[in-house]
């Protein structure tokens, strides 16, 4: 089998990730779209940045009008700066993953209903009565009543729940997420978030980001490994000449 050229290699590395992220975007609505869109833009920008650096280095090497020492210095600066930027962009993309998950989890767990204060006070009294009837710590008591009532769950996820549970609130929220992911009922928002969380698992978002980053570094490494210092043939761009050199290395 013939070796893939550089463009084909990059496409093979990133196309499946792009498809998975697009599928995730198709089931994403509301606030969760913000971190996902940022993630996808950053992933694409990594490739674009690496390609721009490769094109600049290739053109620089072919420019015999500039002193060799100057070309070598600018080349090194370009590659080193691009590597640093790629590292920052990779970290920025990965930082969007927990933000996206948190936004979907917020949509999955029930929220306190907008109703009059008397109704909410009654629900809170019901929660405290139900918890006090359970053995164990406050955390154990809260876990035993999860899922009994969406209204109770919504109150536990509210500011009231934070005050009631204190440092245990995060643990209760995590278990609440697991409880509602396992269910099939809920509001339209909950159904959407449940579907999106499943799609997120299928998409392997961290792996998709890693694929883009690896492809970008490959573009940079390829031009760094080449010694293309002659002008490209007529009608062939410097970038294309560099890719052909990489394929025939």
Image (cartoon, rainbow, N blue to C red):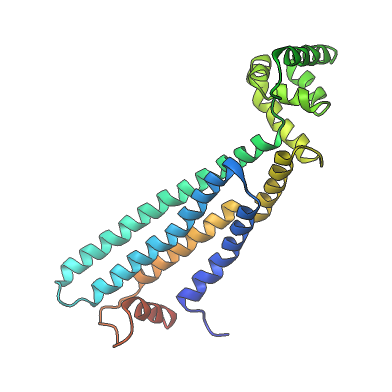
* Relative horizontal placement of residue 153, taking residue 45 as reference (left or right): right
Name the spot of residue 19 as percent of width and height, x first: 60, 63
Residue most toward the bottom? 234
**Above or below 162: residue 218:** below
**Above or below 152: residue 190:** below
Task: Identify the residue at horizontal 47%, vertical 59% (top origin).
Answer: 44
**Above or below 92: residue 153:** above
Nearer-the-camera pick, 83 or 172: 172
Name the spot of residue 153 as percent of width and height, x first: 75, 26
Image quarter of residue 116: top right
Image quarter of residue 101: top right
Name the spot of residue 229 as percent of width and height, x first: 26, 78
Task: Identify the residue at horizontal 69%, vertical 32% (top origin).
Answer: 174
**Above or below 122: residue 64:** below
The N terminus - image quarter? bottom right
The C terminus - image quarter? bottom left
Q: Is residue 112 in sight in this rendering? A: yes
* Relative horizontal placement of residue 90, taking residue 160 as reference (left or right): left
Image quarter of residue 15: bottom right
Task: Identify the residue at horizontal 72%, vertical 48% (top origin).
Answer: 195
Q: Is residue 204 in sight in this rendering? A: no
């Amino acid at each position: 089998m013939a070796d893939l050229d550089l463009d084909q290699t990059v496409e093979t590395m990133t196309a499946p990730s792009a498809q998975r992220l697009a599928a995730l975007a198709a089931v994403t609505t509301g606030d969760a779209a913000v971190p996902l869109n940022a993630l996808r833009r950053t992933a694409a920008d990594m490739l674009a940045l690496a390609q721009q650096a490769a094109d600049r280095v290739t053109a620089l090497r072919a420019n015999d009008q500039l002193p060799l020492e100057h070309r070598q210095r600018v080349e090194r600066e370009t590659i080193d700066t691009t590597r640093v930027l790629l590292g920052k962009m990779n970290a920025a993309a990965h930082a969007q993953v927990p933000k996206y998950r948190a936004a979907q989890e917020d949509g999955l767990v029930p929220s306190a209903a907008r109703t009059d204060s008397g109704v909410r006070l009654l629900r809170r009294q019901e929660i405290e009565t139900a918890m006090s009837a359970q053995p164990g710590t406050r955390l154990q008591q809260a876990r035993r009543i999860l899922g009994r009532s969406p209204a109770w769950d919504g109150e536990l996820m509210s500011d009231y729940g934070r005050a009631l549970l204190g440092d245990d609130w995060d643990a209760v929220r995590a278990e609440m997420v697991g409880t509602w992911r396992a269910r099939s009922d809920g509001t339209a928002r909950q159904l959407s978030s449940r579907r999106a969380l499943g799609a997120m698992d299928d998409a392997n978002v961290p792996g998709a980001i890693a694929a883009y980053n690896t492809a970008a570094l490959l573009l940079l490494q390829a031009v760094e490994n080449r010694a293309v210092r002659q002008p490209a043939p007529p009608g062939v761009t410097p970038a294309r000449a560099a890719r052909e050199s990489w394929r025939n290395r």
